[in-house]
């Protein structure tokens, strides 16, 4: 008899219970990913990002920061997880010389991103906390690649460190750019000479 829960995934209560178990033991749980449908995974991703964005919006005063957290964060998060999934999918084809199911990689990406979203809540108060969240996520990616896809542990760790290094460089460049813009905006305009 066919398992009805496999194509659609578990209900809301079972999903919440699984995520709580995951949060209690992320290293153990990332080694045993659930077999949820694309639709269920996407909804899980969007809701986790939405909750994170909403709570992060509460740390900044203003209606628009909450609205941005609820609307923009899920979109950006889903794009980020999708890009990570595509990167890992093609990494396996090019460097590991094998094809792995994209849905399993997406599942790994969704669950590995959960610590990032939790720590992202405090990023407006302490910006480097974003990097700590991503460090946890890349650690989970390394464990997940090794346990779920039998990737060599050293290669999985090297790949995860490489991903973290790219994010660190992008984060640092973004902070430098924002700092320059803030300094330029705070300087008074120099009046032009009139002849």
Image: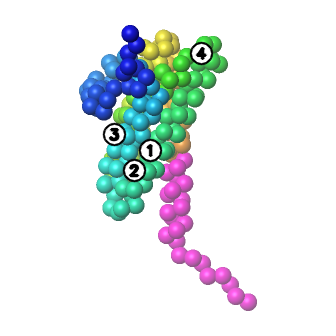
Tell me, yes or no, if residue 138 can be seen here.
Answer: no
Q: Quadrant of the C terminus?
A: bottom right
Relative to residue 14, is residue 157 drawn left or right? Answer: right
Prevailing secondary structure class for the magenta stretch in the rendered image:
helix
**Residue at x 40%, y 61% (from the top left corner):** 64
Position of 21 with respect to 57 (left or right) is: left
Give the Cα distance between marks 1 and 4: 28 Å
Q: Earlier in the sequence, mark 3 or mark 4?
A: 4
Question: Circles 3 and 4: CB distance less than 8 Å?
Answer: no
Determine whether the residue tagged by mark 3 lies in a helix, strand or loop. helix
- Label 1, label 2: how far apart the Cα atoms are: 7 Å
Determine contact: label 1, label 2, CB under 8 Å.
yes
Question: Which residue appears at 52% of the width and 71% of the height?
Answer: 187
Per the rendered image, the range of residues in magenta is 173-195
Name the residue located 36 percent from the left edge and 34 percent from the top edge: 115
8 or 181: nearer the eye?
8
Q: CA distance from mark 3 to mark 1?
A: 13 Å
Q: Secondary structure at mark 4?
A: loop
Please give the residue where the numbered disc 2 appears in the rendered image: 70
Write down the residue under mark 1.
74
Q: Outermost residue toward the right?
A: 195
Q: Residues within 10 Å of mark 4 (few under 14, many from 20)?
A: few
- State which quarter of the image contains the N terminus: top left
Q: Earlier in the sequence, mark 1 or mark 4?
A: 1
């Amino acid at each position: 008899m066919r398992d009805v829960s496999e194509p659609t995934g578990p209900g809301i209560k079972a999903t919440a219970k699984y995520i709580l178990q995951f949060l209690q033991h992320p290293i153990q749980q990332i080694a045993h990913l659930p077999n949820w449908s694309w639709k269920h995974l996407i909804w899980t991703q969007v809701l986790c990002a939405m909750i994170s964005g909403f709570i992060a919006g509460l740390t900044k005063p203003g209606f628009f920061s909450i609205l941005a957290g609820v609307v923009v964060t899920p979109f950006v998060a889903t794009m980020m997880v999708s890009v990570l999934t595509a990167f890992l999918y093609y990494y396996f084809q090019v460097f590991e010389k094998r094809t792995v199911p994209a849905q399993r990689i997406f599942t790994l990406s969704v669950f590995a991103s959960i610590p990032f979203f939790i720590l992202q809540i405090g990023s407006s108060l302490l910006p480097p906390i974003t990097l700590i969240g991503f460090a946890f996520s890349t650690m989970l990616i390394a464990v997940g690649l090794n346990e779920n896809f039998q990737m060599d542990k050293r290669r999985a760790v090297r790949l995860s460190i490489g991903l973290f290094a790219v994010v660190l460089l992008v984060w640092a460049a973004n902070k430098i750019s924002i700092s320059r813009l803030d300094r330029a905006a705070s300087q008074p305009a120099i009046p032009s000479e009139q002849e």
